Image: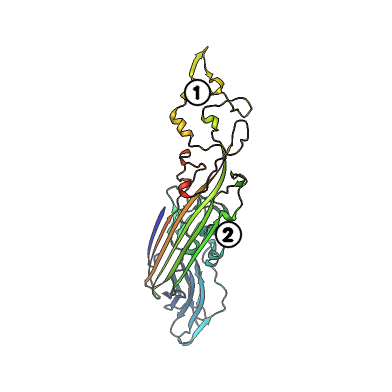
Amino acid sequence: MGVLLAVLAASLAPGQSSQARITGRVIDPDGSAIAGAEVLAINEETGVSTRSRSNEAGIYVLPFLLPGSYTVTASYTGFKKYQRKGLVVETAQKLDLDIRLELGSVTEVVEVTAEAPLLESSSATVSQLLDSRVVTQMPLGNRRALELVRLAANTVWVDYSGLAKPLFSLAGGRTENQMFWLDGGNIQNMRLGVGQVDVDPPVETIREFRVVQNNYSAEFGGSAGGLVVTTTKSGTNRFRGSAFEYFRNDRLDAANFFAPLAGTRKVKAPLRYNLFGATLGGPVVRDKTHFFAGYEGTRRTDGDSQILTVPTELQRRGDFSATFQTNGKPLIIYDPATTRTVGGRVIRDPFPGNVIPADRIDPVARKLVSYWPLPNRPPVNLAGAQNFAGNRARKFTRDNVTGRLDHVFSDNNRFYFRFVYNNDPYGWTSNYPRREADPQSPFDAERDGVPNSVES
């Protein structure tokens, strides 16, 4: 179970962040720097504006930009106003945008509509962005966003260990040596000294994330094998929401080859997979304060057929006259009460007929053996091995709650609060009808309604 709280009050101080920035120079038609020009970036979804002024070298910086589409304007007395709409800014991106102002009245507007896409030329970082369209539309069996890491270059995917945590190698590094950032906060487990992610948010709450292979900035230091920078969704000036459910069921599956028989019918291993939830986001104060909330629940039961060995009816009574070794020789049961030393050797006498007398069987053992089911299939050898078929199931329950609040105090001061709650315990049911026969199982098959083994 994990709970993650994050609060960020941002000023112009640099630090680890999944937010982007736009920087460049404001110049005149001759290429000379223009000092004091006002540059403004307006988020087209939230209406939040970020303002900057160029310095004596004409350089401006627009920091702390959430991923999204922006309108960028620049103005200065004696020059026409510059305007560029639809400028897409991505997670952890540093864009270079030089702005050339033309002579004229500031009331005139030069709207740029056909410029080539901007390149991140100020950074040597090798990375790949997985945007909201990919995150939302890609078919994911478990609906976990970080499974999309396998789409990135230089990635060797291993598995989702324990149904919850992604395991992969990035850019030649070892597994579990990456770093994971969520909205500028570290979400990995450092108690073990490895980059094992503790929070893998649902796809419905993720806007986009960037997989960084190498040459990343020192602000993301501490990684021995790449990093993953994730941004959660935030509210906009429009109310938007979603509701969803994905499911699988064993009624749609065929029985396993090793599934136990109930008469002439095989009993299928259980499979119940329901993943459901909802999201909602919108404005609290338009152009200033926005919220986003999401819930996802998973109820999953994965069945598995196993072949085991249980005591036969004769063995329960202490009769091993029909029990053999795998080589076909009788299995001899010795009487421990006859233990003695002869000629330096410890010897014992076998029970007559290989049968333990009823009064020699411990009453506790006699009670315990009754908890095991009788064989329900022919053994595979004379030793009586693998004479029982049963189904067990891994029960997995996950609840994930995500909440986020964004507020703008001024151009240079922003605040966001994010709450993430994740609880995902799992355990195995028993192959046997009675849980006393398998005390390691934390679940009771009958109580939890899981179809289980079949006795003949």
Mark nearer the viewer, 2 or 1? 1
Q: Residue 261's spot in the image, x, y percent?
A: 59, 44
Residue at the outermost top position: 343
Specify whether 4 is left or right of 336: left
Judge whether 443 appears above or below 284 on screen.
above
Specify whether residue 325 is in view. yes
Task: Give how far apart the Cα atoms at labels 2 and 1 are.
Answer: 66 Å
Secondary element type, mark 1: loop
Specify whether 161 is left or right of 422: right
Residue at x 52% of width, y 59% of height:
143
Residue at x 63% of width, y 33% of height:
381
Judge whether 192 appears above or below 323 on screen.
below
Q: Earlier in the sequence, mark 2 or mark 1?
A: 2
Specify whether residue 92 is in view. no
Q: Residue 278's spot in the image, x, y percent?
A: 46, 65
Q: Give the residue at mark 2.
A: 151
Dots 2, 1 in contact, CB < 8 A: no
Residue at x 52% of width, y 27% of height:
318
Q: Give the residue at mark 1.
A: 357
